[in-house]
Image: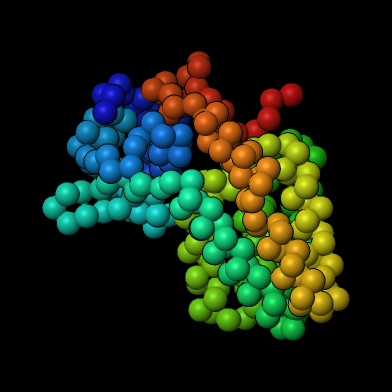
Amino acid sequence: MDTGRPQLEDANIRSAQLPARIVALLEQAIVSGELKGGERLEEVGLATRYGVSRTPVREALRELASRGLVEVRSRRGAVVCSRTPADLAEMFEAMAELEAGCVNLAARRANARDFARIGEAQMACHLAAGAGKVAAYALANERFHHALYDASHNRYLIEAAHRLYARLEPYRRLLLGIAERRGSSLVEHEAILEALMEGDAANAKARVKAHVSILGERFTALAAAIAAVEPASPTAPGREGQARPDGEDRK
């Protein structure tokens, strides 16, 4: 592994932010293929690379493990999980089925508070899309989908949906980095919300499955977005040359 030191532990980044920043850098390296499946992630090596103690590195690896990007093995440390295009296709297929199950129940069980939360998240999506803020849109999109899950009022289904969403979130974020996809995502959200408000479970299920699916051109777009991800920069955050951490479109 490259031993260049981004020196994350500087005056611009509080210690509480370090694990999240390390997660972002490692996530980018894994999704882009810079870090290959099966590659070991040594705490000491990563701490040296990023100029931090082992504690934020350990926290970052635990978070990545919860997202399914690394596996923490006894006596072997953390290892990058292997993930093929077929794996991603199956995971998105499973996500579509889980979300369909959620909205099927939500169409019958959602209350005024649920609709308010879904509507607020959708408004946040509109605002982020209008401002060209990719990171803000991804966060609002997560709120929208989580509100859909919660509206099912089935805690086991909610737990399963949240867990798989976390594993796919880096790839969903890549898709949302495409301006055209954000536009179509907004329209699809509106259609899902409309079907739910009408209590039309069948229509809500069909719309959410189409929304989550990555078949055809959408899968091609995801593959292209993954290929376009640049390796994590060794430049320290806040210095010249560092990519914008919020991923917002430049005007």
On the image, the x and y values in percent for residue 53 come to 25, 38
137 with respect to 76 (left or right): right
Figure quadrant of the C terminus: top right
Looking at this view, name the residue that lies furthest to the bottom. Answer: 108
Looking at this view, name the residue that lies furthest to the left. Answer: 75
Residue shown at the point (58%, 69%) measured from the top left:
98
116 with respect to 43 (left or right): right
Residue 36 visible at all: yes
Vertical position of residue 128 compared to residue 190: above or below: above
**133 vs 38, nearest the viewer:** 38
Colour logic: rainbow
**220 vs 23, nearest the viewer:** 220
When asked about the image quadrant of residue 39, the answer is top left
Residue shown at the point (59%, 48%) measured from the top left:
172
Figure quadrant of the N terminus: top left
When asked about the image quadrant of residue 222, the answer is top right
Vertical position of residue 212 compared to residue 41: above or below: below
Disc tally is 0
On the image, the x and y values in percent for residue 96 come to 61, 63
Residue shown at the point (50%, 62%) measured from the top left:
164
Residue shown at the point (81%, 79%) measured from the top left:
199
On the image, the x and y values in percent for residue 99 come to 63, 68
242 with respect to 4 (left or right): right
Residue 246 visible at all: no
On the image, the x and y values in percent for residue 242 come to 50, 22
Vertical position of residue 248 compared to residue 82: above or below: above
